[in-house]
Image (cartoon, rainbow, N blue to C red):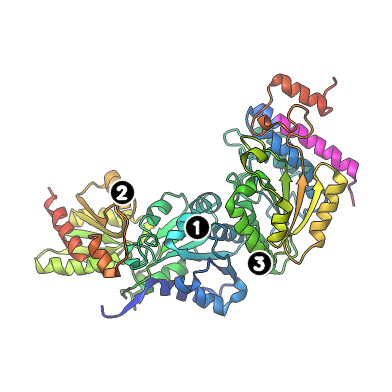
Amino acid sequence: MTWNVEDLEETARKCRVHIVNMVHRAQAGHPGGSLSEIDLLTALYKTQMRVKSDEPTWGDRDRFILSKGHASPGMYAILAEMGFISVEDLSSYRVLGGICQGHVDMKWCPGVDFSAGSLGMGLSFGMGTAIAARLEGSQRQTYVMLGDGEIQEGSVWEAAMAAAHHELGNLNVILDRNRIQNDDFCEAQMRMFDIPAKWRSFGWNVKEVNGHDMNEILEGLEFLGNNNDGPSIIIAHTVKGHGISYMADNPAFHGAAPNDEQYHQAMIELGEVAQ
Amino acid sequence: MSNVAATRDGYGEALLELANNPKVVVLEADLGKSTKSLHFRKAHPNRTVSCGIGEQNMLLVGAGLAASGYIPFASTFAIFTERAFEQMRNGVARPNLAVHVCGSHGGTHTGTDGSSAQSIEDLAIFRTLPNVIVMHPSDIVSTKILTMQLAESNSPSYTRTARNKTPVLYEGKEDLIKIGKGIVLREGNDVAIIACGVMVSESLKAAEQLAQEGIHATVVDMHTLKPLDGQLIDQLVSTCGSIVTAEDHNIIGGLGGAVAEHLASNSPAPLERVGVPDRFGESGGADEMLEVMEISSPFIAEAAQRAIKRKL
């Protein structure tokens, strides 16, 4: 093991800096959901994913599918920290011809395995990659990250039902339960009641974790690894915009960039510049 | 032309032959008995994925398989592929993943199930997607050959098959059949009738009827709507000078639309389009529906005469 919790937290901090830099530079994008997912992505990539940054299309790699593809700054940040792309590449976010497209795209960016941008599609795609692994007799895993607002899409439940029917133990979901969607809090837009119970009733193994506590996240990832009789999900309770005081739990920063003053404040809070 | 068979059976036969390729997988949405993928399922259950009654999920499961090196063939009724249009657009066509979608029971020829099952817009909508091959074969033999060619194509595709039996046209003529190449079935210099699917044999009947009136028509089976065989259309314009299209599909956006687009940009010529007159169908027998929709052979013959009159 080449990692420890402090290292993971430091990588996540660097990723948060990348995220804020990207959306500030582009003056567009989705910082809130990137900041809520980033501790999870950091732990997943650093401790679980069997991938090769120098051979991103290696056939037997684990697959990660960012179904909530608007939270692309988070994914680009971890791909840069993992060496798939360079930190300089991050400045191409939302720029014409750049590999960092507005929503993650497998045709544009090394290390991206799914062309996202339309919610409710990633779990079905992940079911396909999981079946492919099973057909090949490979032990490789598929990880799909869903947003909580995203599961309002009906097609997610088509996939949830089908994945359990096919007992896809190599299919793992991480749900970023940040409680905010585009227009408002999820509770105001569409109440989802007992989310863990919904997944259990669809035949999934379910565990809830604090998505900003590295130790709990690691326990959750271990849970995914240990439950292979069918598909498994960890429901990660997160805070949208976590790490930046004025973005945290604020629906306004689902899809809005900080201005220069707010940017400076964020860099102070992230320890990049002195108070 | 006494020998008849359903194009959907050609799809089923093709899948069985393709099974020799271990990368071929079949996806179903509870209609395998109808689309004819059931034969593959029975022979190769381990390579058949039931997606339940869930077309949106099915197309994207196909995308995930295609992205992992497999060659997925997914089928349901033509009308229900439309429910997954955005999955086809964003999850299949956009990343250019070779998922092969077959919509059976297309067109009003589907008959007694009525308008909810009679897809008359599938060819038009899938034709608007970049990267996607769009086909509507006319007989069991060409459906089988074209489906088998798809496995080598590396492009996503949509193929419409029909529920009911139509004349077998290509027995022993398999070499004529190639994705993207129209087939000249009959030659004449007065007018060219370009048809697809069940309307190909109707067009041959119309040509026979026209011949009795001294009018000589070329008949082309344009089984591939995209990529369209523009070179052949240009030749038809120069030899015949007028064009008729015939399809069991809305008059808007299908084969007639594709040919009109080509003519307008390349070789303007009088064009008469025979197709469903922008209305929904109803329950009725297959042949009755062609009459009600005004697309059966007499309507094609009339359109041919109108097209000829418009020649300068």
* Residues beneath discs 3 and 1 located on the same chain: no
Q: SS for tag 2?
A: helix
- Where is residue A137? Give x, y as percent: 71, 69
At label 2, the amino acid type is His
How many residues crowd around disc 3 within 10 Å: few (fewer than 14), some, or many (20 or more)? some
Can residue A3 be seen in the rendering of this structure?
yes
**Relative to B99, is A120 above or below?**
above
- The magenta segment is A1-21
Q: Nearer the viewer, residue B160 or B213?
A: B160
Does residue B142 lie above or below B263 as drawn? below
Does A196 appear in magenta? no
Residue in the image at 13% along x and 68% along y = B211
Total marks placed: 3
Mark 2 vs mark 1: tell me if same chain.
yes
Residue denoted by label 3 = A165
- Label 1 sits on a secondary structure element that is loop
- At which x and y percent is residue A134? 69, 67
Residue B4 position (above or below residue B303): below
The residue carrying mark 2 is B262
Q: Is residue B269 left or right of residue B131?
A: left
Q: Amino acid at mark 3?
A: His
